[in-house]
Amino acid sequence: MVRGRNDISLMTLLDGEQVSHFRLREFENRDGLAMVHPSVLLSLERVRRDMSGAFGEETWLIITDAVRTDGDLKRLAARFGWIDEGGKVSRDSKHLTRYGGIAVDLVAVLAESRERVSQPSLGRACRKYFDWVKDDYADGHVHADNRGVLGKS
Ligand SMILES: [Zn+2]
């Protein structure tokens, strides 16, 4: 891997203030392709702000998966199965490149204690700022996407 690949701060305006708690590399697929819709960055910053406030300490949102190519999706389906065949992976995943980076999978961790925030708690926070959230995955991650931006052009 090339040193410094996608090591770029992503800035967004949150309540009139420039904030930056995410880097482009956090949204890479394994080949280094990165795609993030601006609405996702804003939603993530809002969730992070709310959770840090609620817990009274810095809360890290850790992106576990973001954009996926068709190849990435097929590899995932090989492990977890397609939904229409009783598995977990949607053929129309909002992670796909054609949706422009509107989906993320994430977990949350309290920075001081390194304690993992519960899945329902993260799911609740995400529901306030993302269009669609799924928080019943066995490994504890939360899926969040802004599918509402699709169709708006
Ligand atoms: Zn997902």
Image (tube, rainbow, N blue to C red):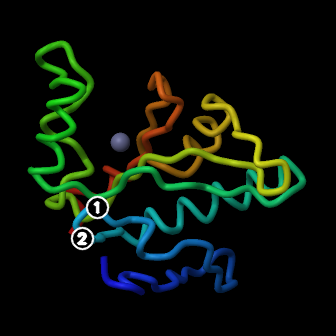
Q: Disc 2 versus disc 1: distance between alpha carbons?
A: 5 Å
- Give the residue type that dot 1 points to: Asn
Residue 132 lies, in percent from the top left, at 41, 40
- Residue neighbourhood size for the residue with mark 2, other residues' Cα within 10 Å, grouped as few (<14), some (14–19), many (≥20): some
- Give the residue type that dot 2 points to: Leu
Q: Residue at x 13, y 36 (%)?
A: 91
Q: Is residue 38 left or right of residue 13?
A: left
Looking at this rendering, what residue extends furthest in the right direction?
56
Q: Judge whether 131 appears above or below 31 on screen.
A: above
Q: Nearer the viewer, residue 14 or 79?
A: 79
Q: Judge whether 75 appears above or below 82 on screen.
A: below
Q: Is residue 133 left or right of residue 5?
A: right
- Residue neighbourhood size for the residue with mark 1, other residues' Cα within 10 Å, grouped as few (<14), some (14–19), many (≥20): some
Under circle 1, the secondary element is: loop
| In contact (CB < 8 Å): disc 2 and disc 1 | yes
Residue 43 lies, in percent from the top left, at 53, 60
Q: Which residue is mark 1?
A: 29
Q: Residue at x 53, y 67 (%)?
A: 42
Q: Which residue is mark 2?
A: 33
The answer as to whether callout 1 falls within 8 Å of ligand 1 is no
